[in-house]
């Protein structure tokens, strides 16, 4: 198994974006430029992103990235710039939900609906959507399933914005 570096230097308010594909440098630079844009309806919020651009992460799959990202207790979602991202017209990143270990201890009777239909593990989002997803999940304003539902309702199955 490949050694994965620690994720260091991320401010708790920064969205975490990890590059796992190195086939197209121009595509990556386009993603980075899009992620740097101010966001919200009127562009009132500055982008706050922690980028990991280290070939040590090359070709890692979602499970491997999630295992590394789970070490950060202040993180609820991680975004991957993978092969699909680099080949997509929309540069759609893969948003992956970092499940809370404590969820396993919830009372099954109370959370029967959650157990009957577990929340989705991931969905695609355009780069500007990263900020919306990260901010709302960080403050508990919305949950991951709400964003996934919006993504799956889109004809391209990509979260864009509400």
Image: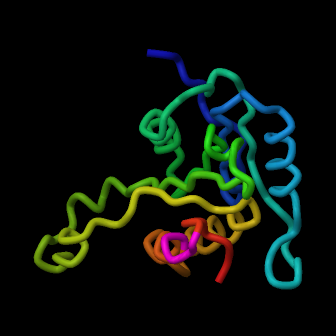
Tell me the residue at 78%/32% (across/down). Answer: 24
- Against 106, residue 59 (above or below) is above
Tell me the residue at 47%/40% (across/down). Answer: 62
Closer to us: 99 or 123: 123
Q: Does the magenta portion include 139? A: no
Q: Does the magenta portion include 152? A: yes
Closer to us: 60 or 87: 87
Residue extending farthest left: 109
- Against 33, residue 27 (above or below) is above
- Against 123, residue 65 (above or below) is above
Give the quadrant of residue 44: bottom right
Q: Residue 51 at what x, y percent from top left?
A: 75, 43
Q: Which residues are magenta?
A: 151-155
Q: Is residue 22 left or right of residue 108?
A: right
Q: Is residue 122 left or right of residue 45?
A: left
Looking at the figure, which quarter contains the C terminus?
Answer: bottom right
Q: Residue 116 at what x, y percent from top left?
A: 18, 71
């Amino acid at each position: 198994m490949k050694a994965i570096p620690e994720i260091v230097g991320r401010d708790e308010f920064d969205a975490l974006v990890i590059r796992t594909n190195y086939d197209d440098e121009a595509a990556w630079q386009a993603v980075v430029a899009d992620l740097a844009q101010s966001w919200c309806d009127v562009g009132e919020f500055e982008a706050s992103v922690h980028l990991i651009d280290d070939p040590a992460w090359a070709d890692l799959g979602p499970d491997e990235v999630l295992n590394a990202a789970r070490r950060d207790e202040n993180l609820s979602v991680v975004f991957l710039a993978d092969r699909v991202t680099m080949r997509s017209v929309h540069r759609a990143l893969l948003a992956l939900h970092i499940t809370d270990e404590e969820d396993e201890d919830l009372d099954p009777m109370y959370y029967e609906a959650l157990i009957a239909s577990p929340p989705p593990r991931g969905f695609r989002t355009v780069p500007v959507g990263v900020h919306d997803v990260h901010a709302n999940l960080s403050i508990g304003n919305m949950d991951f399933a709400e964003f996934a539902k919006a993504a799956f309702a889109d004809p391209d199955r990509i979260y864009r914005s509400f």
